[in-house]
Image (spheres, rainbow, N blue to C red):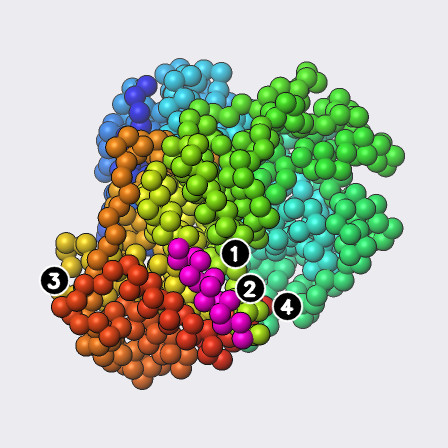
Amino acid sequence: MAEIGRVAVIGAGVMGAGIAAHVANAGVPVRLLDVVPPGATRRDVLAERAIAALLKTEPAPFMSAGAAKLVTPGNIEDHLDALAEADWIVEAVTERRDVKRALYARIEAARRPGSVVSSNTSTLPLATLTDGLPDCFAEDFLITHFFNPPRYMRLLELVAGPSTRADAVAAVTRFADIRLGKTIVRCRDRPGFVANRLGAFWLQTAVVEAIDAGLAIEDVDALFGKPMGLPKTGVFGLIDLVGLDLMPQITASLAAALPAEDAFQARVRPLPLVERLIAEGFTGRKGRGGFYRHDRTSGRKDAVDLATGEVRPARKPDVAAIAESDGSLAALLDHDSPHGAYAWRVLGATLAYAASLLGDAADDVAAIDTAMRLGYGWTHGPFALIDRLGPTWVTERLARDGHAVPPALAAATARSFYRVTDGRLQVIGRDGRHRDVVRPDGVLLLEDVARAAPPVLRNSAAALWDIRDGVACVSFTTKMNTIDPDVLALLRDAIGRVQREFRALVVYNEGESFSVGANLGLALFAANIAAWSEIEARVAEGQETYRALKYAPFPVVGAPAGLALGGGCEILLHCDAVQAHAETYIGLVEAGVGLVPAWGGCKEMLHRWSTVATLPRGPMPPVVKVFETVGTAMVARSAAQAKELLFLRAGDGITMNRDRLLADAKARALAMVDGYAPPAPPRLVLPGPAGRVALGMAIRDLRKRGKATPHDVVVAGALADVLSGGATDVTDTLAEDDLLALERAQLLRLVREPGTLARLEAMLTTGKPLRN
């Protein structure tokens, strides 16, 4: 079938509205329909309310204000004929078979032949939804199970029926992958599919075993957080996050749908404490709290005692098993303590259940691992965890404890589910043979490049990789990809190497963050020992390195995802082009730690805003725009918003699927090679002292109104000096060197301020900005 160009979503609840918002994020028009409430004066009121709620929701479902305009509200009484315009119709109504099937009959009468219809169900098998419906409907029908919130959760579980057209599956898969940025996991038509079935088993087991063992919820969450690579919320924190009231609903639904012999059934039992909490309105973070209670006013945190049900002050975890295991997961699970025994009972049962789902819920190991990583936030999927422990170790431990060992696990004994052969990642199949992991066309992962060959250059903080076709890639290896002297040194070395041996360069990192900026710990250390000349040298080194990137004789493309802050943002400002993941959060945040951008950030932002034709003429409007953005440490909440703030240019690209980012950036770089010439150096006209006075008046006004702290005034004053051009005259033209000198001078002045040192210390110790 043709590409999907229009979408309709029926059901304006949390999930339906979120799906509609994310379709709009892809730039695709979408109709959002719901019922007409009895007695409603506005017949589209449910969809209208949903859109209004989306605009107020945090985290934001829309990537930009423009995306919201692509969602048109309506109702299924007056606007069902609009389905004839839709290429894909998503049903997201209540999880009741009778309600869905009645709706399908109406959809069939209104839709265009060949359009795809899918259900967002999380529990109902496809066969029960299409039984008895016309063949033409079944051929166009499938299940697309999004995870909440749809914008941020990358997993999409897809179930096709025996009659579903292959081209319908291909069209939705292609659209969801490239336009919506989803990783597709093909599931069998089984209750709960993969992620919720295994995730519900894990959570139910963890809660039941914790109650039986009389453990504290803080200890449980500590055990199931970082040590196992599971979400840092742990078990009870995660249940609070997703909603305590959902737990018994999912458990009951799965118990009713799964056969009696399924291992999940042994975990199902009444939980009076959970029932009582829900009845009292303690449904998790969306309600009055759940297992944990947070008082935002006082900062107090309480926790529920599993033994008594009473609420007590939360305490630090007391889990000696974690410390004594010294980072070894096997040692933790073997620890001779109630906590060690509990950890094994839960994880061992969960890993065995995961192995039992192979061939039942999904056909391959990687699908189950991917579902748990992207659906439940596990760092490692269950089969990767088994490899980490050793399949033989897990099998023997399960057998010793009287557990049945699933065939898939028994077949991997003395082997592993994953292995690397000749630089290629391989995964074991159901037949016991290892095969290469094949990435979809258009997916390029740096982890695959690293398996196949060593880097071209490497030091302790960064590396240069050959990603083929004449393109090299620089990546950082520091914590959160912070930028230190070694990163800068490798960038300089890379420029020379690329000039000799390659055609283009991509700056890309595969961690959660592109870069959170300069290493503040080094800066604070140097300031505390008054190593002012060292700080000045590092600032100058960063300026010259970034300038060398900007004027390199080959294209340089930045490829950010996640946080790109401070010095990380400044790298992007000096690239010829940027191909950004949609979920990139870019900003010059130096003011939050008492500094000003000094690796060319002020210079580049002034240059960008000075070219905006819609601003009033004169030197002051660009200065005001940059002052507002940088002075408030504003961070774009998406790549789309980064364009509005000019952290990205209008022509920079946005990639929705994280796994496609490097390939897209490489293609962008290659497209720029022929006829490439470095940009011309900017020359700026700035307002000088008069502009500084005007900005100073604005600063004083903010202070009077209580919107600026004393040190905010100091930092803003330094920023105003840079942006106004210092002592320049409005008739003068400033070169790059002039602006860089101003940045350098003001940073060196601020770093001597006690208020700045306090901000640096607070950020390093608490991770939060200090308002002093």
For numbered disc 3, what is the local secondary structure? loop
Q: Position of residue 569 (x, y in %)?
A: 39, 54
Q: Which numbered circle lies on residue 108? A: none
Q: Which residue, given by chain and number where applicable, does mark 3 sit on? A: 617
Residue 408 lies in quadrant: top right
| Mark 3 or 1, nearer chain start | 1
Q: As shown in the figure, which amino acid type bears the numbered disc 4?
A: Asp
Front residue of 44/500: it is 500
Q: Is residue 355 left or right of residue 591?
A: right
Residue 105's place in the image compared with 27, above or below, is above
Q: As shown in the figure, which amino acid type bears the numbered disc 3?
A: Arg
Q: Which residue, given by chain and number where applicable, does mark 1 sit on? A: 484
Q: Nearer the viewer, mark 4 or mark 2?
A: 2
Main SS, magenta region, reads helix
Q: Residue at the spot x=41%, y=70% of the render?
A: 747
The segment highlighted magenta reads 530-544
Q: Residue at the spot x=14%, y=54% of the render?
A: 613
| Mark 1 or 4, nearer chain start | 4
Q: Is residue 449 highlighted in magenta?
A: no
Q: CA distance from mark 2 to mark 1?
A: 8 Å
Q: Which residue, given by chain and number where applicable, does mark 2 sit on? A: 522
- Whether pointer 2 and pointer 1 mark residues with C-beta atoms closer than 8 Å, the reply is yes
Q: CA distance from mark 3 to mark 2?
A: 42 Å
Q: Residue at the spot x=51%, y=35% of the render?
A: 465
For numbered disc 2, what is the local secondary structure? helix
Q: CA distance from mark 3 to mark 1?
A: 39 Å
Q: Position of residue 2 (x, y in %)?
A: 30, 21
| Mark 2 or 1, nearer chain start | 1
Q: Which numbered circle lies on residue 302? A: 4
Q: Nearer the viewer, mark 3 or mark 2?
A: 2
Bin the neighbour count of mark 4 within 10 Å (Cα to Cα): few under 14, some 14-19, many 20 and up: some
Q: CA distance from mark 4 to mark 2?
A: 37 Å
